[in-house]
Amino acid sequence: MRYLVITLALFAIACGGSVASTPSPGSEGQSTPTQAPFRAVMVAQQPITPSPTPSASPVPINHPPPYTIAIEAGHGGLYYWGASSRDTDGNLWIEKDLALAVALRVDELLTEAGYNSVLIRSQDVTLTYWDAASYRPSLIRETQERVRVANESSADVLLSIHFNGWGDASQHGTEGYCNPDRSFGTESCQLTSLVQQALVAAIRGSGYDITDRGIKNDGLVNGDPQNQHSFILGTNSNFSPSLMPGTIAEVLFLSNPDDLAFMRRADAIDVIARAFVEGLNQYFAWLNNH
Ligand SMILES: [Zn+2]
């Protein structure tokens, strides 16, 4: 287990509410805290300036174990919340928190299983300065730093963990994203498919008959090739791409009452985390027989 040392002091304050602005299925989109009971002062002691990826050489993925997994818990910090929803008891469920909880558990399980695990974030933070008044540049800067960490660790896989949300609460289910048109497209989409199948099987096996929404091309989210999904898997100009197979998992819709009811269960985080590990195990088994 290897934790990224966070040098940027961001104070994580869970407060207020958040609604996804206009996300669409498969992309919880940008969300902005809409209620701020108090104003927090954010002090960046040593702002990190993302540096270009040192080498554009892809990670050699065909090698014996141990394998290294870079785990990216989606979102984080004061302004980058992702999707969120209130349950019937009024509790607020926020994507950044759930993604981190799952990531921490995946990290434990991977370490137990003999993987090298790298948590791209291990706290409720962003790795770079986040300008709340400038969402997209902040997002690109942050994503570039997350990709840089994955590249620096020479990870065999970049696993990006997200939860979905949409204005239409009827949208529900599990979906995965890969980019078949970039380097490692075959591996990325096989990984995404196996993770997707593992998630659906595990959640169904635990008693909730979640919908399988299948896997999608992250380069086509919202019909926008410059969408945020495509940055983490790397196809955009003026962006140093990730150098290994990667996948984005949108585990379920926080905005859907049935999906959220599963998420409220005490075992949900563990069920999901174990499914990720199972999917990774199957991916490397496939890779070695490919
Ligand atoms: Zn997300």
Image: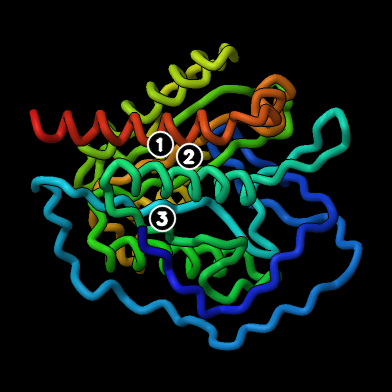
Q: How far apart are marks 2 and 1 (CA)?
A: 9 Å
SS type, badge 1: strand
Query: Is disc 3 surrounded by few (<14), some (14 to 19) or many (20+) residues within 10 Å?
Result: many
Taking the spot 51% from the left edge, 14% from the top edge, the residue there is 204
Report, in whole angstroms, how far the alpha carbon at label 3 lies from the one at label 1.
12 Å
Residue 113 lies in what quarter of the image?
top left
- Using the image, tell me which numbered label, if any, was put on residue 221: 2
Residue extending furthest toward the bottom = 45
Residue 290 in view (yes/no): no
How far from the left and from the top, in percent, is residue 178? 35, 38
Q: Residue at x 31, y 66 (%)?
A: 240
Query: Could you tell me the amino acid type at mark 1?
Result: Tyr
Give how far across and how far down residue 88 sits, in percent.
85, 28
Q: Is residue 250 above or below residue 226?
A: above
Mark 1 residue crowding within 10 angstroms, few (<14) / some (14–19) / many (20+):
many
Rendered-image quadrant of the C terminus: top left
Task: Return the mark for residue 177.
Answer: 1
Q: Which residue is drawn at 21% across and 49% down?
A: 67
| Res. 82 mark | none
Is residue 120 something one can see in this rendering? Answer: yes
The residue identified by callout 3 is 231
Q: Is residue 289 left or right of residue 81?
A: left
Q: In this view, does 78 lie to the left or right of 213?
A: right
Q: Which residue is drawn at 30% across and 36% down?
A: 280
Q: What element carries label 2?
A: helix
Does 68 appear above or below 253? below
Instruction: State the CA–CA distance, disc 2 to disc 3.
Output: 11 Å
Q: Mark 2 against mark 1, which lies toward the viewer? A: 1
Instruction: Give yes or no for contact between labels 2 and 1 (Cβ–Cβ under 8 Å).
Output: yes
Front in this rendered view, residue 90 or 224: 90
Cβ atoms under marks 2 and 3 closer than 8 Å: no
